[in-house]
Image (tube, rainbow, N blue to C red):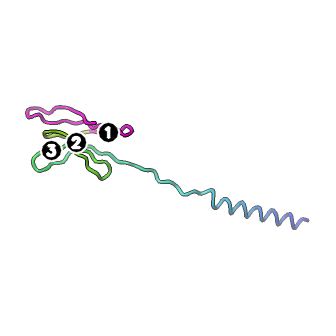
Amino acid sequence: MGKIRNAKIIILFFLILLFSMFYSCPNPVEPVTTVYIAGYYNNGSEDIACYWKDETKVDLETSSKSKANSIYVSGSDIYVAGYYYNGTNNIACYWK
């Protein structure tokens, strides 16, 4: 009787060990990180406000020289603060 009981304990131990090897260490999920950067580039004659979402550049609509200084993301909305030149002065603005 004692040998059978010891064999059952050993089998149970190895089953628990085997089970824990397959189910206790799931593959980790890498977090998704999106990087936003506000700024501008020069097209050869004037500065153009834009932002980058990861590696994709997005131009911000203006009819004149402009620069983006900061960016804020809330859900799917993107807010960019900066300024544009109206021919006489720099005018503070934001883009959504």
Which is closer to the viewer, label 2 or label 3? 2
Q: Are marks 1 and 2 in contact (CB under 8 Å)?
A: no
Residue 76 sits in quarter: top left
For the record, the magenta segment spans 70-96
Residue 39 image point, x, y percent: 23, 44
Residue 61 image point, x, y percent: 20, 40
Secondary structure category for the residue under label 1: strand
Q: Residues within 10 Å of mark 2 (few under 14, many from 20)?
A: some
Residue 5 image point, x, y percent: 86, 63
Is the magenta region chiefly helix, strand or loop? strand
Residue 64, placed above or below residue 19:
above
To which residue does mark 3 refer?
47
Q: Amino acid at mark 2?
A: Leu
Q: Which mark is residue 78?
A: 1
Secondary structure category for the residue under label 3: strand
Secondary structure category for the residue under label 2: loop
Residue 75, placed above or below residue 54:
above
Q: Which mark is residue 50?
A: none
Q: Amino acid at mark 3?
A: Asp
Q: Which mark is residue 60?
A: 2
Q: Amino acid at mark 1?
A: Ile
Which is closer to the viewer, label 1 or label 3? 1
> Could you tell me how far apart the alpha carbons at marks 1 and 2 are, in whole angstroms?
11 Å
Q: Quadrant of the C terminus?
A: top left
> Could you tell me how far apart the alpha carbons at marks 1 and 3 are, in whole angstroms?
21 Å
Q: Is residue 85 magenta?
A: yes
Q: Quadrant of the N terminus?
A: bottom right
